[in-house]
Amino acid sequence: MKWKKDSYYDSIEMINYSRELKAVMSLKNCMIKEPDYTIPISAISKRGHELDVPIKVARFLRQYPSFFEEYTGEKYNLPWFRLTREAIHLSEEEQAVYESNSLDLVDRLKKLVLMSNEQMLPMKIIQGMQWYLGFSADFLQNVVKRFGGAFEVVETNEGLPAIRVIGIKETKVVSQIQKSAVKKYGQLELSPNIAFPLFPSKGLRLKRKISYWLDGFQELPYVSPYEDSSHLNPNSDISEKRIVGVLHEVLSLFVDHSAERKKLLCLRKYLGLPQKFYRAFERHPNIFYLSLKNKTCTAILKEAYNTGSCIEKHPMLDVRKKYIILMKKSARILKERRRSKLLSQTGNGNLSEPGAEEGFESALLLDSSLSFIYPGSLL
């Protein structure tokens, strides 16, 4: 099925800023634990890959003066960075949201684990999904200690530490699609043939043959991601509907209901997905959208960004939006610094001198080098 660009989903602010936001919050977490919230550049300059910083750490820090204030240390004249007051206050608000919504986060972890074949997931797999699930940096370290009645640490057949859910036999887990059906029809037992909510992009036209197939696909029985699917023929349409249901459920658990497609590949083995399960994103463009912005491929759950959605809002969403607002402030600070520097160079702030105006325009063009940090077309 041919991919079609949709500017609506390509311009979702939270998704476009996600990569840089993750790096900002990782660096913030390094400083928030330090005395006076300060740290020398030497302590983090070689941890860029670990902290998911897309460029050199020092350069990245300097691009966000609304978060990180640079100064010269007392010894060796090395650069140091400290958190701004606004960043500290926002971090405190973030921590308060974690504390007040801990049960919600635990429930999301439970659901992800219960979708696995053996109802347990290796710790490293969960860590790979930690950002998308909206967990704090130390959430997994303390989850068993704080919620020992819900989880236990076990070992997989490969000898990997894993998390398993305790005491779930008496409780039936309801998927997001099933919740939507209950809300729409009033009872879950109304029909096992639950259809997915569809959201066609403008201008997307399917061939008649494909359209007929999708109509029949919608009428097939729905297999919950939390049900045993070992009896299904892997080459059947019902099996494909189960795959779509798993991907829908996984994305519904995430903060912004999206994820880099390549980051989801680690789930394949544990969620009982076929080798090329990612093709479901392409085969069902009315359910998912693949954004190719920011030099990556991001899978987006369309339902979450349309009116009438029954998907519950993630408790961390509003906090991350506030982080993005503060990130945007950095662009204005940097522009004002360049302007002030140029004014001082032209003498008495007179931009009418020969060549001054051209110099000012050239300085503003430097913003283009930051285009991957500050997308121009955002919601």
Image (cartoon, rainbow, N blue to C red):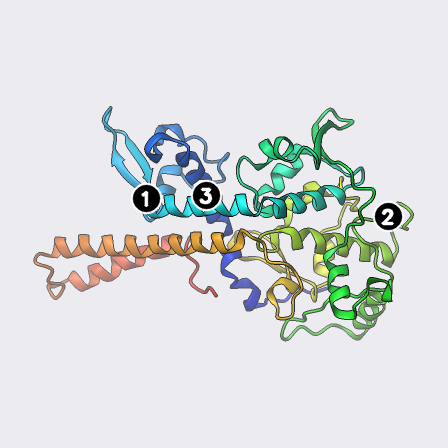
C-beta proximity under 8 Å, tags 3 and 2: no
**Residue at left offset 70%, top offset 27%:** 160
Q: CA distance from mark 2 to mark 1?
A: 51 Å
- Between 318 and 306, the one lying in front of the other is 318
Q: Give the numbered dot on residue 229.
A: 2
- Decide: few, some or many residues near mark 1? Use Cα within 10 Å; few <14, some 14-19, many ≥20: some
Q: Position of residue 156 (x, y in %)?
A: 75, 28
Numbered circles on residues, count:
3
Marked residue nearer the N-terminal end (3 or 2): 3
Left or right, residue 98 beside residue 207? left
Q: Secondary structure at mark 1?
A: loop
Marked residue nearer the N-terminal end (1 or 3): 3
Is residue 196 visible in the rendered image? The answer is no
- Decide: few, some or many residues near mark 2? Use Cα within 10 Å; few <14, some 14-19, many ≥20: some
C-beta proximity under 8 Å, tags 1 and 3: no
C-beta proximity under 8 Å, tags 2 and 1: no
Q: Give the numbered dot on residue 84.
A: 1
Q: Amino acid at mark 3?
A: Met
Q: Nearer the viewer, mark 1 or mark 3?
A: 1
Q: Quadrant of the N terminus?
A: bottom right
Is residue 4 visible in the rendered image? The answer is yes
Q: Quadrant of residue 60?
A: top left
Q: Secondary structure at mark 3?
A: helix
Q: Quadrant of residue 125?
A: top right
**Residue at left offset 52%, top offset 62%:** 12
Q: Amino acid at mark 2?
A: Ser
Q: Nearer the viewer, mark 2 or mark 1?
A: 1
**Residue at left offset 73%, top offset 66%:** 183
- Decide: few, some or many residues near mark 3? Use Cα within 10 Å; few <14, some 14-19, many ≥20: some
Left or right, residue 375 beside residue 337? right
Q: Amino acid at mark 1?
A: Thr
| Residue located beneath label 3 in the image | 25
